[in-house]
Amino acid sequence: MTTISIINLKGGVGKTVSAINIAFVLSSLHGQRVLLIDNDKQANSTKFFSLHSDDDPSMAEILTVKGIDAADVIKHTQYSGLDVLPANMSLLRANKEALIDTTRPQQTRLKRALKSVTGRYDYCLIDNAPDVNISVINALMITDDVLVPVKIDKFAFDGLDVLAEQVEEVKEANERLNFAGCFITMFQRNNINTQGLELLRREAKYPVFQTVIRNTVKVGETTFSGEPLQEYSKNSTAARDYVSLVDEYLGLEKRGGAIG
């Protein structure tokens, strides 16, 4: 199972939309079995598929309940080949509890919980909170590739140094962990965005995917319809862009993790 963490310490960059649509493209167009882990207390990935519950086991229990099996937490979506490990606001409490509980390892709880299901999936996508907390560290401990959605603005790369440092620290315990690169979201074809993109690619310290995710109202509409872009409007620009992004990533994977 190849695990991809979608993360940015900034909010409002299209993190959840990207996690959902990358997961769906992998499952629907590439025939892969995909697990989407919602690792954010806001639970937007969970809510997108109408799987939210404050009572059912969730990512919070993965962190706090000893011996829990992810198989008892994972829920099926309406789409074949795509399952979700849900979250809810209890994840806020769970992060605090896990931090002060030193009776067992804190950073490998997600890894242990997933042991029984890793053979069921080809890919795992993790929609991470814009934070570096215990649940995010747990995610990085099982991650192969980190993908960072970036929106072009003056502060586009703020926080990336901190994130990159965290990746390097976790890499000491998870040697597979790879900062695969950044990809541009909400791109508009105007002079400001075009010049900004050129500047970012020229001056960025981190690899940037060639594929950009173009801005479209269809993305916002899908949050109401509860359908991934490929289902809701497969000919929209963003839908086509996510297909291209996945293709580029899969090519990157074959080349051993280096963009270019």
Image (cartoon, rainbow, N blue to C red):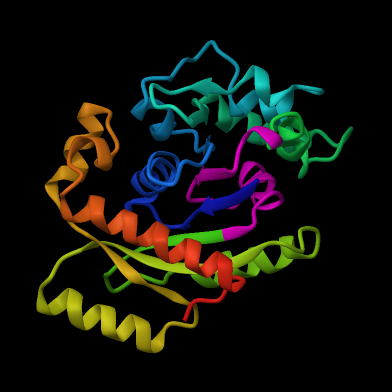
The residue at 66%/17% (across/down) is: 72
Q: Nearer the viewer, residue 104 or 211?
A: 211
Question: In the figure, residue 44 lies in which quadrant?
Answer: top left
Residue located farthest toward the top when viewing the structure as drawn:
55
Residue located farthest toward the left when viewing the structure as drawn:
190
What is the x, y in percent for residue 191?
A: 11, 79
What is the x, y in percent for residue 195?
A: 20, 83
Question: In the figure, residue 232 lies in which quadrant?
Answer: top left
Residue located farthest toward the bottom when viewing the structure as drawn:
202
Say above or below: 162 vs 98: below
How many numbered marks are there?
Answer: 0
Q: Nearer the viewer, residue 145 or 1?
A: 1
Q: Is 28 displayed left or right of 185 in the figure?
A: right
Of the 4 image quadrants, the one containing the N terminus is: top right
Is 231 one of the magenta-colored residues? Answer: no
- The stretch in magenta equals 119-145
The residue at 43%/82% (across/down) is: 204
Q: Is 89 displayed left or right of 67 in the figure?
A: left
Q: Is 45 displayed left or right of 174 in the figure?
A: left
Q: Is 108 displayed left or right of 29 in the figure?
A: right
What is the x, y in percent for residue 187?
A: 21, 65
Q: Nearer the viewer, residue 4 or 240?
A: 240
What is the x, y in percent for residue 176?
A: 72, 62
Is 131 one of the magenta-colored residues? Answer: yes
The residue at 32%/68% (across/down) is: 211
Say above or below: 95 vs 1: above
The residue at 18%/57% (across/down) is: 215
